[in-house]
Structure formats: structure tokens, C-alpha cells
Amino acid sequence: SLSKLQLKTGDLDPRLFSRLRHLQKLDLSDNLLDKFPNSLTLPDLRVLNCNNNKLEDVTALKQFPLLEELTYENNVYLTLNDDYKVMFLLQNLRLLNGKDITKLANHVRRVNSRKLTSKVTAHWEKFFRDQLPEKHTAEQVKSIRKKFLKSVQTNVVYGPSSLSEFTRWRVKMIAEEFLAYSLGLELNSDTEPEEKTDENEEESTESPREAAEDVAQVGDFSSYISNVTVTPSKRKRNHSKSSPGNKRSKTQANTEEEAALNPRKSSHEDVSAEPLHFLQCHSKGNSREDFKTQLWSCVFEPVLDSGARKDPIVSSSRTVATCGGESVCLIDCETGTVLKKYKVATEEFFSVAWTTLTMVLSDSRKKAHNILAAAGRRGIVKLIHVAADFCYGEIKAHKKPIATVCFSPTQETHLFTASYDKRIALWDIGIPDCDYNFKASQLLVLETASIPLRIALVPTCPEQYLLAGCEDGCFAWNIQLDKGQKSRPFEAIFQFPDEESMTTSHRVDGLAFLNDDVVVSKSSKPGCIYLWSWSRSFDAKGKGCQRTMPAVILAELEWSTTDMSYLTLSTCPAKEYVFCGDEQGSVWMYNLSSHTTAWGSAKGKRSERRISPTQILTWPELRVNGEQPPEILVNNVVADPAFTYLVVLTSVNITAIWKKS
């Protein structure tokens, strides 16, 4: 055991370690190691613990071929891609960070390698074979080798985007082997030959994602699963109503327990999505009896290595942040595992948002990291560096509760906070240095006539206009920072159809953009969802502030007749979907891909009839300890950008995760 000795990489002397021929267990946890020297040898090492270091790379671990158990938790720079690298490099590895990875590792070494090898070979045959003349010079070989390696790493894609770094690493390795063995071209000595598989071996039909399920079971909570039954039968609707003027209270809560309630899958319903997990991970006082904590906001984590491709479908992971009560949770949607949890004893969180900051490391190198902002009743924004498990700062943004927060898509340090003090503030949260020192500053204050509930930046000009749904209408502000004026009134208020005429006065509790121009907004007064055109409604050329502008309505969506407020909506722009939950636990889904082209044309007319939902996902008959939870309101429902998962947040402390079939 060499734990807690402040050891750095230079302290591991190969001359000393190479003499430890029979060492089987080594504990290097809680040190300052950033990498392993390549020549420690240790030919008989079976168990290695490197928890709580600063490791940035795992490839040097291939020098320990007999390693069976490896742990390197809380090494902030290691990712899922590194897990897959060690599974490939260490053929005898059984346990990784305490989990049995035998099945997944076999898939990585065999099926994954075979698929990539065939893709690499096909890429050579299709694009490069004819470029190499029969009699070639060393210079020609060098040139084509360089071009092929670059092209194959860019164009050969396989598996989820979250593993793209691992895939590129394997593709390069396979391509170099291919060039060496098939064509006699030079092979880089630092790559490992791919494991050869028996040609007659039956190929596994599992995808890496399916195999991963075996790795990450929610085992700690299996005692609760037996008490839960789920029947996907339809609920009866009982139309209980709250008086329109009464606000639903956002009840206080907290939890440390993750009770995973696994449903039986429906076989008799024709559904395009199936319930995957029901989680009770925001409970007050860890109580499994807590069906009162309201869950409010969720957002999928961006993928760090989506690189220059700003395609939204490859820029999100299967990890989602949820908030409610005194806690914020990070959940893996596929496995239902609660990966991380943050609690603030006196807080009630209402909103979360992600941004990616390029931070400077202690050795002056730059690295991108995801930062989560969480805010709520106390008016304070908490800033969390998720990979480091560290809440590194807070911004005392408002003296009253913060209803919602969002980051600018173009300025990664710009954060908008909308508060019950009837102000929307724009903050520059700064970039923390290697010691997490940061400086936040307020750039702008937008004055609202009533409490702002939802905010959205206009996609075509996110640095110029912000839209907000408020308690008493829908407003727009000019947010350009070069205008000098730090505190600004609204520039426009939008009119919507009322029973007989047009009105500006109504609560807008749902607001999102479906595409660059189409706005989706929900007014609790008429109980319907409108789609309207930003460009045709907002007159940018007009002079003066606080102008009234009629919203140019494109269509109306048929939705629940409830007058219950704060059941918000969301959109999946890449798939042209709108989602909204109701007062009975159901999720209304609208596929609008057949309408958007017509709306986009200059003469786009309003759809005469209300558009019905493509599908309504009904809440399964969920029983906990033999009893059904009380009335279920769906406060929020969010899909990942590729619409693989649908996360449903309820008023009864249950997060439901559906997966598209």
C-alpha cells in the first residue's frame, strides 16, 4: 500500500518497481499521479487501486497483462472512453471500478473489433486501394498512409457518440495493423495488435448499450423492487381542477435514496415508447413514503467530444440532470443508475442548465468540462463541476426565488436567471482557474411586468433577442450588450386569441422554439398550445419600447382541458416533436414534421383545425407497497436531442424514463 503519500508520477521509480516480480496487489489511491511510467513491469500484478489521483490516460496500464481488478474512480479526466480502452487492452480484466465487466469486455474485444475491422477494410477498398500504384516509392507509401489514417479516423463511425474517442483510437490502431499486415507498410510500435477471434465463433447479438446494462445494475435498491408492480393499463380521468388564480405550491423536499421502480414492459399496447425506469431519487429524509416532493426541471448533458460537429443529435449523452426538493441528481437513462447527487439542506431547486467551459489545467493545458448550474427558492445559482464532484461556487443572483435558468448557446459563460423579483438577469459566470477561483459579473437586467416563468433565446439571433413567458403575458427584449443601457424594459408584448378577441393578458407557462422560427407557447387561460411565427410576429424595424404585437398563429395543438398551471412543454427540434404532460400523468406527443415545411413558406397559412397529438403515453398503473401514488401531474417532460429517451418529471417525486421502441 502506497496510499496517501502525495506521490507524483516521477516518484514511481522503474528500477525499484521492476524488482517486485511477485507483487500481486498495489494500492496507489489518494495520490497526485497524472500518468503511469511505461516500464514499471510488475509481471504478476492482479489488483490495482488508483482512486483519487489525477490520471489523464490509461493506455500505459497495458504493461500489466494479468490485471484482473482495476479501480480508478475520482480521476476527473478519465471518461467512459477510457473504460473501454482498458477493457480492450487488459484481456484478463474482470472487475472495473467494482463492477463485473466480463460480458461487456468480451463484446468490446470481439464484436466491436470485428465490426471496426470490416469498416476499415471497406474504407481502404473503396477510397484508397486504387491510389497506390503497383510499383510505389517510399514517399508515395508515406503519403497514402498519412491520408488513409486521417480519413479513416474521420469517416469510420460505430456505436454511440459518447464513445467516439474510443472508436477513433481503435480505428487508428486497426488501420495501422491493416497497413502493416496486408500491405507491408510500417506499423507504429505503440499500438497493440487486435485480438484475433475464431472465425467460427458465434457473433454476440448484444449492442454495447445492452451489454452495458449488465455492468451498471441498481443493485443497492433491489429490496424495493419487489414491492412495486406496474401495469400499463389506462387510468381513468377524473377532472379535478384547481382554481385558476391559485398557484401550485412547489413543496420543499430532499432525499438520499434512489428507489428504482422497474416496470413490466407492455406487450398489449401499441406504443412507440416503453417505460424503462421509475425512480424515486429526490425523497425528503430518504423516505420511500415521500410522494409529495415536486420535480421541476431536467436537461440532458452535452457530449464533450462532439468536436466541430454541432449536430444536436451527436451533442447529447444519455445522462440527464434532474432537480426537485433539496437535491439535483444525475441519472443514466439506459441503466436507471443515479450517478451523482447534490444536496443543499435549505434549498428547493426549480431549474438546472448545462454549459461546456474550456478550463486551464495546472500545467497550462486547456480542457473542456461540463458545468451544471442549479437554482431555486433561495435565489442563488450553484455552479457544479460534475466530473470533479465539486460545487465550486455560487452566485447570489436574486433576493427572491429563481424560476428558471438558461445558458447562451453562443457565449458559454453567459447565464440568464429569471426570478420572482420580476427581473431577468444576464450573468457572465467566468471561467474557473485550476484552483476554482472565478469571477462572476452581472451584464444586464431585463425588467418584467410580472413573474417570468419560462425563457427562450431566439435561435437565429441568440445574442439579440430573448423571449419570456410570464404570469401576465409573453414578452420580448433586446439583449444586445453594445446598447449601453444595463436595465431595460421589454420591447414587445404579444397578443393571442381570446374567446372573442385578442388579449395580451394571460399566463404563459410553456415556451420553446420548435425550429429557427416556430415558437410553441402554452397559455393556461384557454388551455391550449399555440404555434406561431417569431419572424412574422416581431417587427424589428419599429421604434420604441413596450409595443404590442399580434402573434401570427400557425396552428393550435389539441391538449388537455385542464386549467392546472405550470405543466410545461418542451420540443425536440431535430425530430420536430412537441411534448407536454397533463394532470393525469399522461404525455402528449406531437410529430409536426409534416407541417413545418408549409409553415416555413412565405404564404404559410394557419392550419384550420387543431392538430391532434400523434400519441398520448398514459401513465402505467404503478403500485408501491400495494398502493397507487396520489394524483400525478406531469410538471415537465424532456427528450434527448435524438429522441431516444423521454424523461418525465412528476408532482409525486417519481422520475419516469421512457425509451423509444
Image (tube, rainbow, N blue to C red):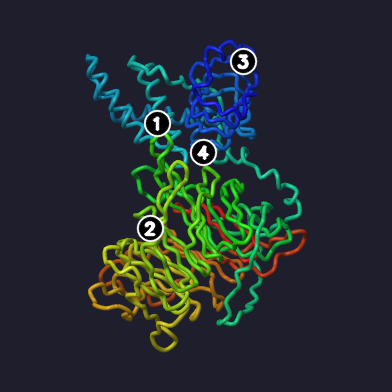
Mark found first going from the N terminus, 3 or 2: 3
Left or right: 431 with respect to 323?
left
Three-letter code for the amino acid on which mark 3 is drawn: Asp
Mark 1, Cα crowd under 10 Å, few <14 / some 14-19 / many 20+, is some
Residue wearing tag 2: 408
- Kindly identify which residue carries mark 1: 119
Contact between marks 3 and 2 (CB within 8 A): the answer is no
SS at mark 1? Answer: helix
Q: Are marks 1 and 2 in contact (CB under 8 Å)?
A: no
Q: Earlier in the sequence, mark 3 or mark 4?
A: 3
Check disc 4 and report the residue beneath it.
76
Q: CA distance from mark 4 to mark 2?
A: 26 Å
Residue found at x 50% / y 66%: 402
Disc with the residue nearer the chain's start (1 vs 3): 3
| Residue name at image x 53 percent, y 61 percent | 297
Q: Secondary structure at mark 3?
A: loop
Q: Is residue 192 above or below residue 75?
A: above
The residues tagged by marks 1 and 2 sit, at their Cα atoms, a distance apart of 38 Å
The mark lying in front, picked from 1 and 4, is 4
Q: Residue at x 52, y 70 (%)?
A: 400
- The residue tagged 3 is 44
Residue type pointed to by label 4: Val
The outermost residue toward the bottom is 500
Name which of mark 4 and mark 2 comes first in the sequence.
4
Compare residues 199 and 431 and report the one nearer the observer: 431
User: How crowded is the residue under tag 3: few (<14 C-alpha within 10 Å), some, or many (20+)?
Assistant: some
Distance between the Cα atoms at labels 1 and 4?
33 Å
Q: Is residue 37 visible?
A: yes
Q: Amino acid at mark 2?
A: Ser
Residue type, label 1: Lys
Alpha carbons under labels 3 and 4: distance apart: 28 Å
